[in-house]
Amino acid sequence: MANAETLKQSILAQVAEYYRLVHSEQPFTPGESRVHYAGRVFDEREMVNTVDSVLDFWLTAGPWAQQFEKKLGAFLGVREVFPVNSGSSANLVAVTALCSQQLDNPLRPGDEVIVPATSFPTTVNPIIQNGLVPVFVDMNAADLNLDVTQLDAALSDRTRAVIFAHTLGIPADLDVIKAFTDKHDLYLIEDACDALGSKWNGKMVGTFGDFGTLSCYPAHHITMGEGGAVYTNQPKLGKIARAVRDWGRDCWCGYNSPVNGKCGIRFEREVPGIPGFYDHKYFYTEIGYNLKLTDPQAAMGVAQLDKLPDFIATRKANYAYLHAAFQQFDDYLQLPEPDGRADVSWFAFPMMVREGAPFQRHELTRYLEANHVETRLIFAGNITRQPAYQHTTYRAVGDLRVADDIMERGFFVGVYPGLDRPRLDYMIDVFKKFLRR
Ligand SMILES: Cc1ncc(COP(=O)(O)O)c(C=O)c1O
């Protein structure tokens, strides 16, 4: 055993050395290197944790996943965290859990769910996948979130839930949304995939409703390669969400469950019509999936969580630096205006080309990309205009004009911690060159 431990420490030391040799230098050559919109930011600790977990060879969610749950729960201030294999899976688990027959008043096929027209596809898709009807509301151009003044107009006697993303980290007006969902007894899911660490009135977004969700795709605040989490403060919803994630099984024994499990009654279940007792691990109470993540992913996530406060601080500083510089482009570019109650953990720097500007959005983004500054569009634009949604059943409130504007004129550039001053200055310079033409 001593030999094994010595060998392990030597391997991990070499992994750290490998990181320093291969990955630590990120040289920047203006005009040649790409200024990414996002990317994984890591050092030897992520690589060491991941290899450590591979050497343990637990593979499926285990001790590292348990640590990840605890750390993320402490950061967010939530009771129940369930790691999953993507942010999309987190949204699927959340919506599916609200359809559970174990709830007194579950969502039922045909029920309506209010959702912003400018959404990421997999914020909307679980609504459709569960036989529910999306009701699209228009956007607010100032913060690129759902226009909360349209919530009343969206309401019908089938409305049962609201689900929305805090766009690119900018918190939506949770005072109005929460008052609306409370008043009409609606479920609320916050897709906080882009908003880890954002706060509304000093409280973490994702913790206001029934479920919050997280993505750990490399573009996001922390990464596990692929991965995410769904979280809640309600133990009953947590138990259902776990079952939906884990094949639909009722067992909640956790990662290290001994033969008789944490519940202590593993072999005391009865199935009507089947004599004797039935193993709880094979007792299904939900129509589930397998959406779990692996332990090496969680090991990486643990190292990322340790850095999260610094990541958030750098994202804010990069945003502030770009924001100050972009003021000079005010004639052409409309910058976001978050509400005063929002403390934004920026995912990116979104903006819209002003109506009447002497160029179109694609001319600017093509120029930026040609000059190695990466850009991305804002979610699916007006999602009702995307081909996949042409044959789905939905309702739209009004003409979704602002969602169209965002689709026509919106885009974003990066603020992630991999961007330093030379990269930001280069980006500002490329904007300047285009806009001065
Ligand atoms: C708001 C939002 N929700 C959900 C997702 C899906 O996350 P994932 O890529 O981990 O499936 C994304 C992805 O970027 C997103 O931006």
Image: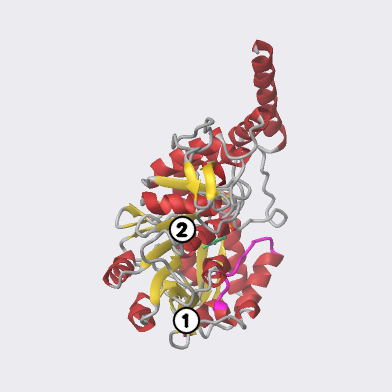
The disc label shown at residue 192, or none = 2
- The response on whether ligand 1 sits within 8 Å of label 2 is no
Q: Is residue 326 above or below residue 233?
A: below
**Pick the front one: 437 or 217:** 217
Question: Which of 275 and 7 lies nearest the eye of the viewer?
Answer: 275
Q: Residues within 10 Å of mark 2 (few under 14, many from 20)?
A: many
Residue 348 visible in the current orientation: no
Q: Is residue 59 left or right of residue 182?
A: right
| Residues at marks 2 and 1 touching, judged by CB atoms closer than 8 Å | no
Q: Decide whether residue 378 is among the magenta residues.
A: yes
Q: Residue at x 59, y 44 (%)?
A: 41
Percent position of residue 105, x then y = 37, 66
Q: Quadrant of residue 219?
A: bottom right
Three-letter residue code for mark 1: Val
Foreground: 390 or 139? 390
The numbered disc on residue 402 is 1
Quick one: quadrant of the C terminus? bottom right
Seen from the viewer's position, the closer of residues 163 and 252 is 252
Q: Furthest-bottom residue in view?
A: 399
Residue at image coords 42%, 62%:
189
